[in-house]
Image (cartoon, grey):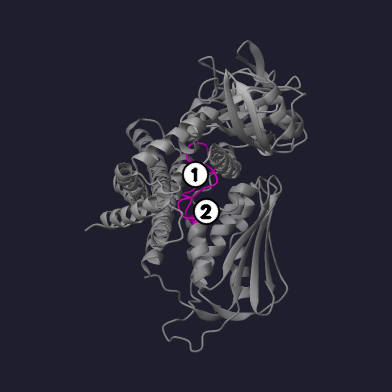
């Protein structure tokens, strides 16, 4: 026998016994008692609806805050906000300046609006500030079938005043014919001036809530309806959209806010319980006709007469209802599992009981959230891999094209009668050589990253004078740096510091950071290399007076597959894996690397390495002091091969 059947028979037995016992006193039930019963039921329903609305209010404010943050992050990813007052765009007969995020125009940006709507289900609008108005230039809100472009918020609006004062706004707002829980934030240009606003919102009374309220029935003809302080009917199963402020009972309800009332409406006497929800300015009213009371009295008499026959039917119905209330959460959870098995990871079980089914529901929700997070991370990782391979393809293709073009030019010169100029031949030779170095650098970096990821890369740690190594590397780049019209300076607070490092890898680290400093500085800029002995650690600073790095980009420069500039709009060559490799090499020394940078003023990369010693030198790990000057120069040419200016 199933659980449902066991529950059913148990409830039937209990109800039959109780009904027989109570049948003897049913005749004594009076109309007053029935009136109190309906009144109590009405009050319970009013309280239930208030609880539902309160919970929805809290959830909507949380969701609006989350959705607005998401929409803002997506919009900020396009770039800095700005307004082009020289470029006028016509929006519903309004001549407006063009609003940009980076290079993306935000006027009629349908793809962005649709993405926000698809992900969050919210209405979304972008406003431009013009002529003391916030004018809607992109939206998914419709007015009479058309998008509500060109509509505006003027200085009389609280939203306008908060936005222009550089404050966000969260609250209840009327949008076209409906009320929404909305959030708005200002958009700033590079000078921190307000140039527009971004807003998202969710409708207060959505279809689901309206359907729930509409299904509530009190007695035979009772129902729930909602008014606001102006007497407007927010919801009513029959007269939604009308105004009842002219009726005395409506004025009484608005004045008292909470309580009960008896009144006549449309030739029916009614009794009602009402309560006020201040956050939304809603009066939630549960009402029933007095005819239900008389009908219930007749039903009691008929029930008393036919109690023997009717009790079984009633018992079965009640037993079915009670058994369903226990089995329903399990069925709901089963339905959610089926949807997840079909690939829908947005589903969440709404079973919130404290019993075993509730625990299972919460575990299920946690598992679905984790799977969804893993799926999103996998998608993002795939996107980054595609971008990385695009960068690597570019880095391989560019030097190959240059080499191929140079060899074609040489071939043309050799085959023509034109006299060969030794200077030009030397220039062609240097071009081929530089791009060969560039290919060699890329291959070396890819091999080293692969070794590090696979765990096959090992450091050759030696107890050496770190000051001498860093100073020699810095001084070996002086001629190259000077040839690029830059200056390089080395400074230290100590002349000797013996510690365990891999000299060759330290050279890779220093040359990579100096190479970056050259690429992102201008002629006559200065690069300063400073070594500071702090006792337990050594800090090596490579500081330049170049273009700097934007704050929002500083967190990604050391990540694999990431670059500050995109492939199609970057100003300098590079595969985007150099700093990632440097970060890995520093980490293998049990150190870390950080960056301090201000846009337009320069950057400072700081390598911090602990001052440890290897306990016993390896006989095969000997510093090669015989490395020639030509070898050092060649390493510099390899590391600096992607510098063309």
Extreme-top residue of the structure: 93
Q: Provide the residue designation for mark 1.
A: 28
In this rendered view, identify the residue nearer to me: 149 or 268.
268
The quarter of the rendered structure image containing the N terminus is bottom left
| Quarter of the image where one finds residue 452 | bottom left
In this rendering, does residue 343 appear at all?
no
**Mark 2 vs 1: CB contact within 8 A:** no
Rate crowding at label 2 as few (under 14), some (14 to 19) or many (20 or more) other CA atoms within 10 Å: many
The quarter of the rendered structure image containing the C terminus is top right
| Quarter of the image where one finds residue 70 | top right
Extreme-bottom residue of the structure: 616
Residue 331 image position (x, y, % from top left): 32, 49
In this rendered view, identify the residue nearer to me: 170 or 51.
51
What secondary structure is marked by label 2? loop
Residue 434 image position (x, y, % from top left): 46, 49
Q: Which stretch is magenta?
A: 558-578
Can residue 568 be found in the magenta stretch?
Answer: yes
Q: Provide the residue designation for mark 2.
A: 640
Can residue 618 be found in the magenta stretch?
Answer: no
Q: Residue at x 41, y 34 (%)?
A: 419
What secondary structure is marked by label 1? helix
Residue 16 image position (x, y, % from top left): 34, 52
Residue 198 image position (x, y, % from top left): 63, 32
Give the alpha-carbon distance from disc 2 to disc 1, as whole Å. Answer: 102 Å
| Majority secondary structure of magenta residues | loop
Q: Residue at x 49, y 68 (%)?
A: 505
555 lies left or right of 597: left
């Amino acid at each position: 026998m199933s659980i449902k059947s066991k529950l059913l028979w148990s409830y039937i037995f209990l109800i039959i016994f109780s009904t027989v016992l109570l049948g003897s006193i049913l005749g004594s039930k009076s109309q007053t008692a029935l009136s109190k019963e309906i009144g109590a039921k009405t009050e319970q329903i009013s309280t239930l609806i208030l609880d539902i609305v309160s919970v929805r209010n809290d959830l909507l404010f949380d969701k609006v805050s989350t959705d607005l943050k998401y929409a803002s992050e997506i919009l900020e990813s396009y770039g800095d906000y700005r307004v082009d007052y020289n470029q006028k765009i016509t929006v519903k007969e309004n001549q407006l300046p063009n609003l940009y995020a980076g290079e993306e125009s935000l006027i009629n940006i349908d793809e962005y609006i649709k993405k926000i709507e698809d992900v969050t289900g919210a209405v979304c609008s972008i406003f431009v500030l013009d002529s003391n108005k916030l004018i809607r230039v992109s939206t998914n809100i419709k007015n009479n079938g058309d998008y509500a472009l060109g509509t505006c918020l003027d200085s009389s609006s609280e939203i306008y005043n908060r936005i222009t004062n550089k404050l966000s706004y969260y609250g209840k707002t009327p949008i076209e014919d409906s009320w929404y829980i909305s959030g708005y934030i200002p958009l700033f240009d590079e000078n921190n001036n307000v140039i527009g606003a971004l807003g998202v919102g969710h409708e207060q009374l959505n279809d689901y809530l309206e359907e729930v309220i509409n299904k509530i029935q009190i007695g035979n003809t009772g129902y729930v309806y909602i008014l606001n302080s102006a007497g407007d009917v927010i919801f009513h199963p029959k007269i939604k959209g009308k105004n009842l402020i002219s009726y005395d009972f409506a004025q009484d309800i608005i004045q008292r806010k909470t309580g009960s009332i008896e009144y006549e409406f449309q030739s029916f006497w009614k009794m009602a319980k009402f309560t006020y929800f201040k956050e939304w300015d809603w009066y939630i009213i549960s009402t029933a006709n007095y005819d239900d009371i008389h009908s219930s009295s007749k039903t009691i008499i008929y029930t008393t007469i036919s109690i023997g026959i009717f009790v079984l039917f009633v018992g079965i119905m009640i037993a079915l209802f009670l058994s369903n209330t226990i089995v329903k959460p399990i069925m709901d959870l089963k339905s959610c599992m089926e949807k997840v098995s079909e690939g829908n990871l947005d589903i969440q079980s709404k079973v919130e009981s404290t019993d075993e089914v509730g625990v299972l529901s919460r575990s299920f929700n946690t598992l679905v959230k984790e799977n969804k997070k893993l799926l999103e991370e996998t998608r993002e990782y795939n996107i980054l891999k595609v971008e990385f391979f695009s960068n690597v393809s570019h880095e391989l293709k560019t030097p190959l094209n240059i080499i191929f073009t140079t060899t074609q030019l040489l071939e043309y010169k050799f085959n023509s009668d034109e006299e060969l100029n030794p200077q030009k031949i030397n220039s062609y030779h240097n071009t081929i050589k530089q791009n060969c170095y560039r290919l060699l650098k890329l291959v070396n970096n890819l091999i080293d990253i692969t070794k590090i990821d696979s765990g096959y890369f090992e450091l050759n740690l030696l107890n050496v004078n770190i000051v001498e190594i860093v100073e020699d590397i810095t001084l070996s780049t002086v001629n190259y740096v000077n040839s690029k019209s830059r200056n390089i300076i080395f400074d230290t607070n100590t002349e000797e510091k013996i510690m365990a490092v891999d000299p060759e890898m330290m050279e890779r680290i220093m040359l990579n950071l100096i190479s970056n400093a050259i690429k992102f500085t201008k002629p006559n800029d200065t690069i300063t290399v400073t070594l500071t002995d702090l006792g337990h650690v050594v800090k090596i600073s490579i500081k330049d007076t170049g273009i700097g790095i934007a704050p929002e980009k500083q967190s990604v420069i050391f990540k694999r597959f990431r670059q500050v500039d995109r492939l199609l709009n970057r100003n300098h060559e590079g595969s985007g894996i150099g700093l990632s490799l440097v970060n890995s090499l520093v980490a293998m020394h049990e150190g870390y690397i950080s960056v301090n940078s201000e846009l337009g003023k320069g950057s400072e990369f700081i390598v911090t390495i602990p001052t440890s010693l290897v306990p016993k030198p390896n006989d095969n790990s000997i510093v090669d002091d015989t490395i020639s000057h030509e070898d050092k120069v060649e390493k510099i040419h390899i590391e600096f091969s992607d510098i063309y200016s």
